[in-house]
Structures are given as C-alpha cells and as structure tokens.
Image (cartoon, rainbow, N blue to C red):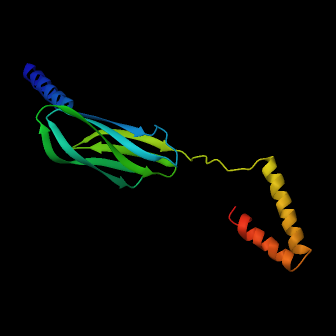
Amino acid sequence: MGAVLALAGALLLTCGTAAAQETASIMILPSATPTSTDRVLARVTHFQGDGCYSVVPAVTSLPGGVFEVRYSVVGVVFPAPCTKVFDVDLGVLPAGSYTVRFITNVVLAAASFTVSVSSIPVPAIGEWGVAILAILVAVLAMLYGRWGGARRRLAGAIWDCCLQGA
C-alpha cells in the first residue's frame, strides 16, 4: 500500500512540475465584449518554462466560431524561462459567440467572447437645415415648373453646380 501511495505521489509531483513549466492566458481586445464594427485581437501571454523561444503565431478559423492559435518556433533566444506576449488579429467579426484556443502540444488557454451588433449613429440635419432645404426645393420646383427656356437652364446649372453633389 505504501508503494502505491509513493508511486501516486511521484506521478502527481511529475505532472504538477510539467504543467507548471508552460502556462498561457488570452485577453480579447479592444474589450471583452467587442461590437460588429471592432477589429478583434486575441492577446496571448505565454510563459515558456523550458527556455525562451522566438515564435511566429498563426491563427486558424474553424467552424462554429472557434479560432485556434498555434505558433512555429523559429529560434532559441536563451535557455532561461521567459514570458512572450503576442497579438493575433481575428478580424472584424459578425455578431455571435466565439472561442479562441491557444495550443502548443495541448490546449494551454481558451477564452470565449460574444460580439454584439454595433449601433451606428444616423446622420441628421437640424431645424435650420430642413428649412433651407425646403426653400431650395420650392425655388427649384417653381423654376422648373413655371418658366421654361433660360430660367430652366439656370435652374439646371444651379442643380449641376451646387446641389447635385450635396
């Protein structure tokens, strides 16, 4: 019985040590609740316990709103532990629920977030703008409807010059 407990303790100690060597976390930017007009980034903070590596991250979009972030090691910086922080661009996403997973050999971190519909302000004009617009429409209607010839050409010139691009 004592040998079984010693073996279980050794396995627990070994697994705990291995798990402590590499950890990660994910933060969603610009906020934890982005909107459908925001460019969404996943900031991955990765503690490398067995040495500091130079990495190139890559993201893969999977069905169901899942993004997998993995990296390729491109070189060893130094053999001491370090923390790497990098951003991965997920793009502008439609409204819905999403999950980001950071994977080395195993899933080290995951973050879920919801993109909401953005409320886009509608441009409007004030009371004076409406009054001026009504007067211009009335003047143009009179020039087009009542008089012909030169006045109609004048109204057309006013339209072409000043009002068509407004």
Horizontally, residue 49 falls left or right of residue 59, namely: left
Viewer can see residue 65: no
Above or below: residue 143 compared with residue 81: below
Name the image quarter holding the N terminus.
top left
Residue farthest toward the top in the current orientation of the protein: 2
Above or below: residue 145 compared with residue 41: below
Q: Position of residue 158 (x, y in %)?
A: 77, 68
The residue sitting at 45% across, 40% down in the picture is 30
The residue sitting at 87% across, 71% down in the picture is 143
**Number of callouts in the render?**
0
Q: Position of residue 152 (x, y in %)?
A: 84, 76
Where residue 77 sits, quadrant-wise, is: top left
The residue sitting at 7% across, 22% down in the picture is 3
Q: Position of residue 162 (x, y in %)?
A: 73, 64
Name the image quarter holding the C terminus.
bottom right
Horizontally, residue 78 falls left or right of residue 43, namely: left
| In-front residue for pair 157/38 | 157
| In-front residue for pair 143/72 | 143
The residue sitting at 61% across, 48% down in the picture is 120
Residue farthest toward the bottom in the current orientation of the protein: 149
Residue farthest toward the left in the current orientation of the protein: 3
Above or below: residue 115 compared with residue 137: above
Viewer can see residue 88: yes
Horizontally, residue 76 falls left or right of residue 39, namely: left
Where residue 49 sits, quadrant-wise, is: top left
Q: Position of residue 155 (x, y in %)?
A: 81, 71
